[in-house]
């Protein structure tokens, strides 16, 4: 993966806890959001939740 802003290829993964606007499907199924962050310029190039299949069971589409 390459940063679309600076072109570097080194990233760290940061976890955004549910207390900071995480995705909440129900009170019991809150999911943390993870971000891939460029270590050179700080750009978030990807955001995701682990085990997205857990989201499908608690919310209408």
Image (cartoon, rainbow, N blue to C red):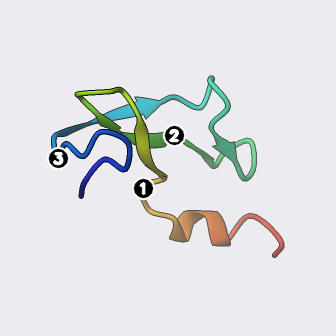
Image location of residue 11, percent across then percent down:
22, 39
Disc 2 to disc 3: CB gap under 8 Å: no
Residue matched to label 1: 50
User: Mark 1 and mark 2: span between their CA atoms?
Assistant: 8 Å
**Does label 3 or label 1 sit earlier along the sequence?**
3
State the mark number for residue 32: 2
User: Which disc number belongs to residue 9?
Assistant: 3
Q: Which residue is drawn at 16% across and 40% down?
A: 10
- Mark 1 / mark 2, whichever is N-terminal: 2
Q: Which of 33 and 30 is in front in this view?
A: 33
The 10 Å Cα crowd at callout 2, few under 14, some 14 to 19, many 20 or more, is some
- Residue at image position (83%, 72%) is 60
The residue shown at (17%, 47%) is 9
Q: Residue 51's spot in the image, x, y percent?
A: 44, 62
Q: Compare marks 2 and 3 and give the one earlier in the sequence.
A: 3
| CA separation in Å, label 2 and label 3 | 24 Å
* Residue 7 position within the rendered picture, expressed as x and y whole percent measured from the top left: 24, 46
Question: Mark 1 touching mark 2, by CB under 8 A?
Answer: yes
Residue 2 position, x and y percent, is 25, 53
Give the quarter of the image for residue 24.
top right
Packing grade of label 1 (10 A; few <14, some 14-19, many >=20) is few
């Amino acid at each position: 993966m390459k940063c679309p802003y600076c072109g570097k290829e080194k990233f760290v993964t940061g976890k955004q806890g549910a207390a900071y606007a995480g995705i909440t499907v129900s009170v019991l199924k809150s999911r943390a959001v993870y971000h891939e962050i460029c270590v050179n310029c700080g750009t978030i190039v990807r955001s995701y939740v682990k085990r997205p299949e857990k989201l499908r069971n608690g919310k209408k589409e």
